[in-house]
Image (tube, helix red, strand yellow):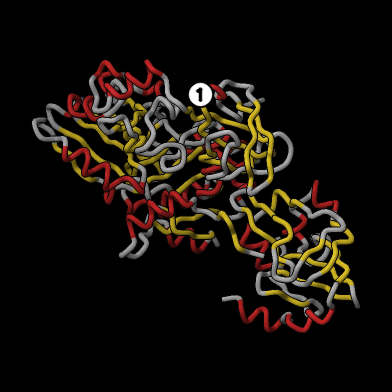
């Protein structure tokens, strides 16, 4: 498993999600802390492409051997792509949570919501 | 994310844990320092602070299926029963035929209420003609001890709490016996046998039992000796394994977990434990068990496997009636597996069932025990 890291170019949600924002689109995933708390991920249940998701609401689930966890949307929008490779290799979420382990890409409905998210230092301060 | 809807330990066990320890500190085994130093994730479990995993549940699970793993199960309790009427007493309290345990033998049984409700499931070792050691589940130890002692009147026996006198290690896997034998002063006991040995310079009881479906032994030893024996086992190549993999290993072979798969509201017949009940011995609850065996029960505990994707968890409803009591991802079968109570009409092997997994219907099939077969 990768060492703890919280890249500076991401925005963070208190439910341990990250967003990589590029104009009015964004990529979402879960943070190193979240994947570590969950343990080895064995199942990712992706939302449908086209699904509308809302900031602060659960939009999918990830499961480890022992636990299931809701994944919360850090921002609102429409799912334009899901990471299909996770169907066969869900452990990628543990191995590379900010890269190959991304979950969905979203067309943002309100890019100004980004202002409510935390930067890396603010997020890390929330972790015990 | 991370509202973990179901994180270890199971809710039922957390309840059990809170009963034991709501006003006290979590207890630690003699190996706490070893676990902490190894970077184990430590969680509250039945009133104890126990390692749930060291590296990862899947790799620990595979280590036990293919090599040798060592578990710290020192949270489990021990009750010693001695005296001229020890046998007669245990025959009354335990469901199995205790007379059939030879000296140096071991036997699985349940302890029942008068109405057949299961108080605990237990392994009992006959250490001498009139000396028996019974291993309790951690969350049930005080309850079991009180039940046993409250029924001892009229028997010439001493029922003694020995939980503080023993640490307990389980060494399990196809390489486990060779590994322990290499540290032992003599041959190891066979399956369901027990003997005294010196292992890694410590005197202990070596028991040919386990909870993984693999061959192996369980060691009952003095708490002070546990850290050095642990180090010796790791030095000989055993992988430390936490309670997370202990749960996935036992569920693959359909061993019951008290508090999940049965409790005082279930009788041994519906729980699939009729094989360890010998009603003719007249144990407490025998009449109720005999009636349940004769008349049948409305529900039965069955193993199941999910067809396709999804992982059912404890508490998920079976559509049409029933409930999942244990559910996890099977590292060996690489699919969701579990046990559930279903109506007896739907308990036959091969019956298709559907499970409501957090609002999504997952098809599953009632399977035969064990779900995981060695070499299959």
**Residue nearer the viewer, A18 or B62:** A18
Disc 1 residue crowd, few under 14, some 14–19, many 20+, Cα 10 Å: some
On the image, which quarter does residue B189 sit in?
Answer: top left
Where residue B8 sits in the image (x, y, percent)? 52, 54
Report the chain holding disc 1.
Answer: B
Judged left or right of residue B371, residue A107 is: right
Locate the C terminus of chain B by quadrant: top right
Q: Is residue A11 visible?
A: yes
Q: Is residue B29 visible?
A: no
Q: Quadrant of residue B318?
A: top right
Which residue is identified by label 1?
Answer: B344
Residue situated in front as seen by the camera: B183 or B282: B282
The secondary element bearing badge 1 is classed as helix
Residue B174: where, in percent of width, then height?
56, 32
Name the residue located 37 percent from the left edge and 26 percent from the top edge. Answer: B193
Q: Nearer the viewer, residue B146 or B243?
A: B146
Q: Is residue B154 left or right of B268 when viewed as pictured?
A: left
Give the residue at x 33% y 45%. B140
In the rendered image, the vertical position of residue B9 relative to residue B340, given as above or below: below
């Amino acid at each position: 498993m990768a060492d703890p890291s919280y890249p500076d170019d991401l925005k963070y949600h208190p439910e341990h999600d990250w967003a990589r924002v590029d104009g009015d689109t964004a990529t979402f995933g879960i943070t190193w802390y979240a994947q570590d708390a969950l343990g080895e991920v064995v199942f990712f249940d992706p939302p449908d492409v086209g699904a509308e998701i809302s900031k602060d609401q659960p939009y999918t689930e990830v499961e480890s051997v022992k636990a299931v966890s809701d994944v919360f949307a850090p921002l609102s929008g429409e799912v334009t792509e899901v990471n299909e490779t996770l169907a066969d290799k869900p452990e990628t979420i543990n191995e590379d949570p900010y890269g190959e382990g991304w979950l969905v890409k979203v067309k943002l409905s309100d890019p100004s919501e980004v202002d409510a998210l935390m930067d890396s230092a603010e997020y890390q301060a929330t972790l015990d | 994310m991370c509202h973990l809807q179901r994180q270890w330990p199971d809710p039922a066990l957390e309840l059990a844990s809170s009963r034991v320890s709501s006003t006290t500190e979590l207890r630690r085994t003699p190996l706490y320092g070893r676990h902490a130093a190894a970077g184990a994730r430590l969680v509250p479990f039945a009133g104890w602070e126990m390692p749930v995993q060291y590296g990862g549940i899947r790799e620990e699970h595979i280590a036990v299926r293919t090599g040798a793993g060592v578990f710290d199960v020192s949270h489990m309790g021990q009750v010693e029963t001695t005296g001229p009427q020890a046998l007669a007493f245990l025959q009354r309290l335990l469901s199995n035929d205790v007379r059939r345990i030879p000296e140096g033998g071991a036997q699985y049984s349940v302890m029942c209420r008068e109405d057949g409700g299961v108080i605990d499931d237990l392994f009992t070792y006959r250490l001498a003609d009139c000396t028996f050691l019974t291993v309790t589940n951690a969350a049930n130890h005080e309850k079991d001890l009180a039940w046993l002692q409250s029924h001892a009147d009229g028997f010439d026996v001493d029922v003694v709490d020995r939980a503080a006198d023993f640490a307990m290690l389980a060494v399990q896997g196809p390489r486990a016996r060779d590994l322990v034998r290499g540290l032992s002063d003599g041959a190891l006991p066979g399956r369901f046998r027990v003997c005294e040995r010196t292992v890694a310079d410590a005197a202990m009881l070596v028991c040919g039992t386990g909870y993984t479906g693999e061959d192996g032994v369980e060691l009952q030893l003095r708490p002070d000796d546990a850290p050095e024996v642990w180090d010796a086992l790791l030095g000989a190549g055993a992988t430390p394994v936490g309670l997370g993999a202990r749960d996935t290993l036992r569920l693959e072979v359909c061993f019951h977990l008290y508090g999940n798969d049965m409790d005082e509201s279930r009788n041994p017949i519906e729980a699939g434990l009729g094989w360890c009940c010998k009603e003719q011995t007249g144990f407490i609850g025998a009449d109720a068990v005999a009636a349940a065996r004769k008349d049948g029960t409305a529900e039965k505990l069955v193993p199941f496997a999910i067809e396709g994707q999804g992982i059912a968890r404890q508490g998920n409803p079976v559509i049409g009636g029933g409930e999942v009591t244990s559910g996890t991802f099977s590292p060996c079968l690489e699919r969701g597996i579990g046990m559930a109570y279903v109506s007896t009409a739907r308990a036959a092997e091969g019956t298709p069932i559907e499970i409501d997994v957090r609002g999504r219907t997952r098809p599953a099939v009632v399977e035969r025990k064990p779900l995981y077969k060695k070499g299959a």
